[in-house]
Image (tube, helix red, strand yellow):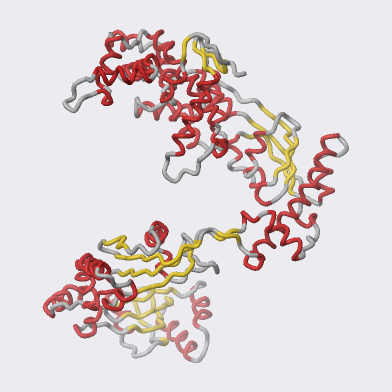
Amino acid sequence: MLAHIRAWSSSTFAKIIVALIILAFVLIAYAGSLVFRGSGATETVATVGDQVLQRQYLEASVRQLVGQYAQIPGSEIKTMADFEERDPTQQVVNNFVESAMWPQQADAMGIEASDADVRDAIVRDPRFQRQDGSFNEALYQTFALNNNPEAYAAQLASQVIGRKIRGLPLAEDFTLPQGWSDPIAAYLSEKRAAVGFIMPESAAGEVAITDELLQAYLTENQDDFMWPELRSAEVIAFSAEDVYQRYEVEEERVVALFERRKDDAAHPETRVIEQISVESLAAAQGYVERLRAGEQWPAIAFEATQAAPLNLGDVSADKLDPALAEVAFAASEPGILDPVEGAEGATIMRVISITPAVEPTLEAMREELEKELKIVVAKRNLFDLSQELDFKLGDGLSLVDAAKAMDLPLVSLTSVDRSGRDKSGTRPSEIASNAGIMAAIFNAKLDDETIVSTDESLSYVVDVTQIEAPAAKTFEEARTQVMLAYTQAERMKALTAQVDALKARVASGEITMEQAAQEAGAELLVQTANTRDGYISAASFFRDRSQSIFAADGADALVSDDSQGQVALIQITEIEAGDPSAPSQAAEQTLQLMSNSWQTDLADAYKQAVRDNGGYRIINRVVNDARESIAIELGLQ
């Protein structure tokens, strides 16, 4: 059977069907609870072929999604209202469409899950196995009595067919089905042209500010002016660099390290030198006399060479021509040197600075060498030191007393947020910028002393002494923030009102966009027709508002946009519909992703390719369009 499938899968029809089947696995997890053959007594909300989605199962599945999200650690989803932005109904409907499509396509390919296949999958289900691995028939029958055994069997059948499909080879000439390639190409090749302008901020006029107005604004928007949870804690934090001085190292190790490092520490005498090359020694001597008489070095260099003097940098004698080095390093102090004659003329040199040679000695390097060796010892002993601290804390010592007893650094943090900043917005200590320490403080319970981390780099203990729940800022605490927010809100309100008035006049034909820009005292900007991808390299005005431009409904549509902290008016002047047959880099990349991994889901590969080719914010809309275009039949009531 499988050999027949592999041979048949090389046909064009088979390739398209395979792609459709891969697509169907996007949300297969809920297929068993959604798909029922024939009609039911309750309201039908979607139909694909002979399979229907009933409202009672739609609502139950949505509740199931909410419950699953609520179990995610850190999830803020507690009620259906919290879930609205995730559009759970659309998720369930998409799942139904895809899970209902693939059995029909599998039938067309001759791929099936036999009763024996399904029975084998049931026997292998770990939920129905005894400890010795044998099948517990009684446990399965109990499960069947309390659940829908037909739906469970259908889900197992889909998994069996999925495993069979994944065994098919991917042909080299495999292409995306039109249901995917056409929407991708049309979406990416659509072009739009637009004109627009930004309403100048000066048009908002002066904003009246009184304490009464600010207080009212704070009351209306108190949630925007809150102190986050704040915590106070005592912290002992130490690294090897903090405790290395308590250790000693043998003199032999210091001497051995010195012998290894002394050559690297030694430096010959160096000098910063500039030079001017002239044609003859006589000319060079004349220039030297003028320089020593007070004329400027750059001026002489330009006269002699029509260029600036050549800077040789900070060089040692071995980096120079021997004849030049002999003169340059004979001088006892910086200054103009006697010229040096060479085969092609003469050279005048100026020594700018002198760095004496460094001859390292053990005593000069001792402090640095001992510190390096002691830090190595301290790193090895960091864990033991942490354990000693843990024992003292276990014996009942406070963090403060333990720090004194062990001579360890103690830091008190008072009313800091998760980023380590206090109410003034500053970090009171360097350790407050350590993400691990701050996470430990905000994960610890009140008065819970725990050694949170001990490794080769850092050990720390936190003792949370106070927890302040999120609280509203008082008027005085929030006054500066409120003033800025209120001023901006009032300016935006005034600018929006003016843009809306101009928008209405343009829409009625009273004035043109050019006249509207003139009345606003703004420059009318023009964007020629371009694709979404092309807008990435457009002027910032259009690039930042491309989402609004491509979301506008039809040519001549007017869009007011208040993004980027500005208020703008935009008119769509031209729309060129996308070409479904246009070559699509995203489509090609989708195929490439799939060819690299046969088990890559078509929808996932497509989404990733679109993200890689522009990072569009409305990918889901295109994905939904593609799903609908390949659905056999879909009716929503």
Horizontal and vertical percent position of residue 174: 40, 19
Determine the image quadrant of residue 55: top right
Q: Nearer the viewer, residue 191 or 104?
A: 104
Assign the C terminus to one quadrant of the image: top right
Residue at 28% in and 18% down: 121
Residue at 51% in and 81% down: 300
Determine the image quadrant of residue 269: bottom left
| In the image: residue 434, left or right of residue 525 | left
| In the image: residue 78, left or right of residue 574 | left
Residue at 34% in and 88% down: 331
The answer to whether any part of residue 265 appears in the image is: no
Determine the image quadrant of residue 2: top left
Relative to 535, is 141 above or below?
A: above
Assign the N terminus to one quadrant of the image: top left
The answer to whether any part of residue 69 appears in the image is: yes
Q: Nearer the viewer, residue 465 or 375?
A: 465
Horizontal and vertical percent position of residue 10: 36, 12
Relative to 114, is 476 above or below?
A: below
Q: Nearer the viewer, residue 105 or 332?
A: 105
Relative to 69, is 477 above or below?
A: below
